[in-house]
Image (cartoon, rainbow, N blue to C red):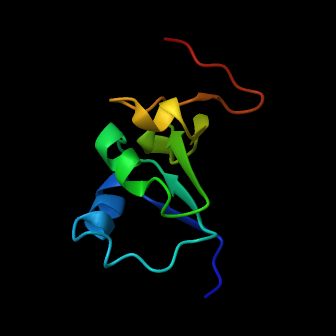
């Protein structure tokens, strides 16, 4: 299909890597977007190197929008709980 971006929940990404990655297509240049659920550090590490980039997205499920984003690399992938990133442009996050 020559897709360059794939978005899926961590549950779907986990199912694709659970058998050692045999279910994954050739992802060399693919940007992998994950959101809708918390991304575990274990899964982030399993996806490392499978595609061009892994991006963790966060937002309220009820509105199906993204509120925060972070491209994961280096220490962010190695974290036990990968960060959800910073608010997207023109928004603020309050905790």
Report the front residue among 51 and 10.
51
Report the front residue among 11 and 16.
16
Quarter of the image where one finds residue 70: top right
Quarter of the image where one finds residue 89: top right
Q: Is residue 33 visible?
A: yes
Which residue is found at the position 60% from the left and 37% from the top?
69
Q: Measured along the vertical axis of the image, is residue 40 above or below residue 32?
A: above
Q: Position of residue 33 (x, y in %)?
A: 53, 55
Report the front residue among 36 and 65.
36
Q: Measured along the vertical axis of the image, is residue 47 above or below residue 70?
A: below
Q: Position of residue 53 (x, y in %)?
A: 60, 54
In this image, 50 relative to 2: left or right?
left
In this image, 91 relative to 32: left or right?
right
Q: Measured along the vertical axis of the image, is residue 70 above or below residue 45?
A: above
Q: Residue furthest bottom?
A: 1
Which residue is found at the position 50% from the left and 38% from the top?
58
In this image, 72 relative to 60: left or right?
right
Q: Position of residue 37 (x, y in %)?
A: 35, 44
Q: Is residue 40 visible?
A: no
Which residue is found at the position 46% from the left and 53% from the top?
48
């Amino acid at each position: 299909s020559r897709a360059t971006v794939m978005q899926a929940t961590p549950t779907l990404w986990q199912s694709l890597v659970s058998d050692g990655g045999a279910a994954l297509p050739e992802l060399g240049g693919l940007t992998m977007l994950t959101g809708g659920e918390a991304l575990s550090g274990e899964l982030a590490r399993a996806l490392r190197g499978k595609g061009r980039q892994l991006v963790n997205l966060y937002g309220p499920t009820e509105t199906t929008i993204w509120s925060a984003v972070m491209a994961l690399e280096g220490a962010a992938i190695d974290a036990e709980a990968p960060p959800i990133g910073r608010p997207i442009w023109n928004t603020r996050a309050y905790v």
